[in-house]
Image (spheres, grey):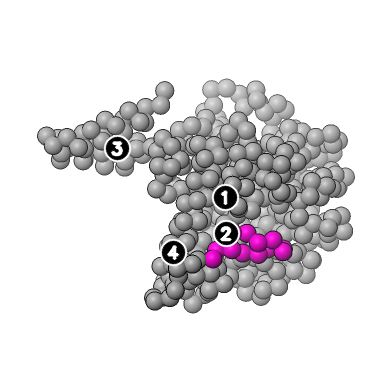
Amino acid sequence: MNEAPGRRQFLRMLATSPALAAGGWAALLNGIAQGEDLITAADQAVNVLEFEDVARKNLPPWHYGYLATGVTDDSTLKANRDAFARYQLRTRRLVDVKKVDMSVTLFGTTWDSPIMLSPVGSQRAFHPEGEIPVARAAAAQKHNLIVSTHSSTPIEAVNEALGHPAWFQLYPTDDWNVTKAVVKRAEKAGCPVMVLTVDSQNGALRDTLFKLRRAAPVKCTDCHIGGFVYNAVASRRPMFEGLDLAKVTTQLPLDMTWDVLPRLKELTTMKLVIKGIVTREDALLALEHGADGIIVSNHGGRSEDSKRASIDCLPEVIAAVNGKVPVLVDGGFRRGTDFFKALAMGARAVCIGRPYLWGLAAFGQAGVETVLTLLRKELQIDMRQAGTASIAQITKDFLIEG
Ligand SMILES: Cc1cc2nc3c(=O)[nH]c(=O)nc-3n(C[C@H](O)[C@H](O)[C@H](O)COP(=O)(O)O)c2cc1C
């Protein structure tokens, strides 16, 4: 039973009752502070953070754990958010900001907004239709979408819902025949860009997920047939359908090195973007080995325990790349000013993970659409407040580290 609307009405009644005025306000504020004032429709949301509580309420704790987890004590996850406070905006006045152009061009395609959707696996954990409502929302709101190797929906069906081919994210596995088949399938589906994730070798210590999973009243293996051994995981993913997974043991081979980039480039005409770079040294190696783009990312704080925020890694990567290829970033972006800060540092686009999943788990397609709309609106407001009418005008002069 959903208690939230009734409780909220009750709190509001208390708040407007003249006799109870003082106590009523206190009860209302207390209710909000306790997270009891949950929104009941996407269009009630004031900001994207409000979707998280609804997602937590809607999902079984172990699926919420998959969404929310970081690694060990979640400190890299926390760092991704906390770091934004160290950067402030230097806002300018009396600039004509009547028209704000948020468009960006990447690999020959122009997008209305620099806000893109990071690849996320297994979205059926959050909604019965998985990636389909996300693709429809991305299409309706005109945002770029990156689809995971581990999607619960075949890439072809996602592309159909999107209306054009998405970017495809690759986990190559340790069997090159499987890698080849997966890459060829994404290419055949028309995907123009392949994103190779390199920050997530097996073995992430996802304590938050593991604790919530332990609390599950049913065995996870009742649904996840074969358990969490990698080839059993892969066998449940449509991207591996029909492939012989007997030799597959991991999503990213532990002995994978930089020569995988030229090998992949030989296989495909798709542009190759490398996701998970956090240092200048690796940015230079990525360029040397033929990367067409870089995503600065620590996997949303859910792979490494570096305790270093994505936004803090961005400047050194941008400096090393020196404009040769586009640099994107993700990790902890929740407010318009977060996007503004990354763009001011020189990011060409910024991706989000959890916020659109909160929207999906809370209200399906409408939730994802509202998350995207709110983030665009916030960025537009922040651009106007700063006196910037286009993405190109957002430069490092608008940023100060304090
Ligand atoms: C539930 C979940 C599943 C993810 N699955 C993948 C994946 O399959 N491939 C990948 O490259 N990144 C994956 N990521 C990482 C995201 O692409 C992205 O880097 C991260 O979510 C960005 O941080 P944010 O969630 O704070 O916005 C996943 C993230 C989450 C939250």
Q: Which residue is mark 2?
A: 113
Q: Are marks 1 and 2 in contact (CB under 8 Å)?
A: yes
In the displayed structure, does residue 228 sit left or right of residue 261?
A: left
Q: Is residue 107 magenta?
A: yes
Q: Which residue is mark 3?
A: 31
Label 4 sits on residue: 382
The magenta segment: 101-114
Q: CA distance from mark 3 to mark 2?
A: 36 Å
Q: Residues within 10 Å of mark 1 (few under 14, many from 20)?
A: some
Residue 205, given in percent of the width and then of the height, sits at 60, 44
| Label 4 vs 2, first from the N-terminus | 2
Q: Amino acid at mark 3?
A: Gly
- Between disc 3 and disc 1, the foreground one is 1
Determine the residue located farthest toward the left in the rendered image: 19
Pointer 3 local density, CA inside 10 Å: few below 14, some 14–19, many at least 20: some
Residue drawn 76% across and 59% down?
Answer: 272
Q: Which mark is residue 141?
A: 1
Q: How would you rate the neighbour count of disc 4 (Cα within 10 Å): few for under 14, some for 14-19, many for 20 or more?
A: many
